[in-house]
Image (tube, helix red, strand yellow):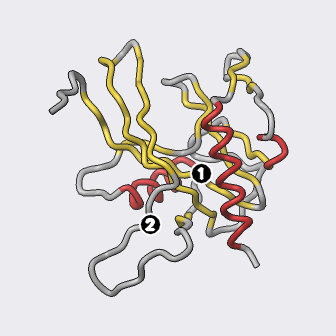
Amino acid sequence: MTVVPFERHHTATAYVVAGARTLLLWHGKLRMWLPPGGHLEPNEDPVQGAVREALEESGLPVEVIAPPGLLAVERPLVLPPPAVILVEDIVRDDQPFHQHIDHVYFTVARARVDFGAPIPHGQHHWFAMSELAEAFSLPAPDGTLVPVAEDVRLLGIRALSAVAAREP
């Protein structure tokens, strides 16, 4: 049996897709551009966490995109699986080292989106697939250019593709 000498926290992330664009937010504590997401609350499942985080941070109600062929039964409750589960090292000056076990979901906005409107979280950008095709950087609030992490960019492309595949 392997003993992990540090804490692991379960988190949920929601790639929010609307109008063939996906949302990235500036995360000041981690100094990164990320989709909405955060820690699961007590007794919250990862789907509930992703939907809640999307609403809290973007102001948008969202629906998780379930994979085709998801088991449909009356009982037990069947949750759609995440698109991926990431194990992320969290290194911050204000906290001991820990990891996030991040349940990443692709979601679609259930309300009309005004792409120029402010959102609860603050600094943000909506990206089309063509903008995510190559590595790029975005300015932090202080003007410093910060590269968008490769996994964030590639999962954004997959989220946009997942929504496009389900539309008639």
Crowd around label 1: few <14 · some 14–19 · many ≥20 (10 Å): many
Crowd around label 2: few <14 · some 14–19 · many ≥20 (10 Å): some
Q: Tell me the element at label 2.
A: loop
Residue 24, located in which quarter of the rendered image? top right
Q: Which numbered tag is attached to residue 80?
A: 2
Q: Residue at x 71, y 48 (%)?
A: 157
Residue 43, located in which quarter of the rendered image? bottom left
Q: Position of residue 49 (x, y in %)?
A: 40, 54
Q: Residue at x 47, y 75 (%)?
A: 70
Q: Is residue 100 above or below residue 138?
A: below
Q: Which numbered tag is attached to residue 15?
A: 1
User: Farthest residue toward the front?
Assistant: 1
Seen in the image, is 41 located left or right of residue 150? Answer: left
Cα–Cα gap, marks 2 and 1:
15 Å
Counting labels gives 2
Residue 111, located in which quarter of the rendered image? bottom right
Task: Identify residue type, mark 2.
Answer: Pro
Q: Tell me the element at label 1.
A: strand
Q: Position of residue 41 (x, y in %)?
A: 30, 49
- Specify the quadrant that holds the N terminus: top left
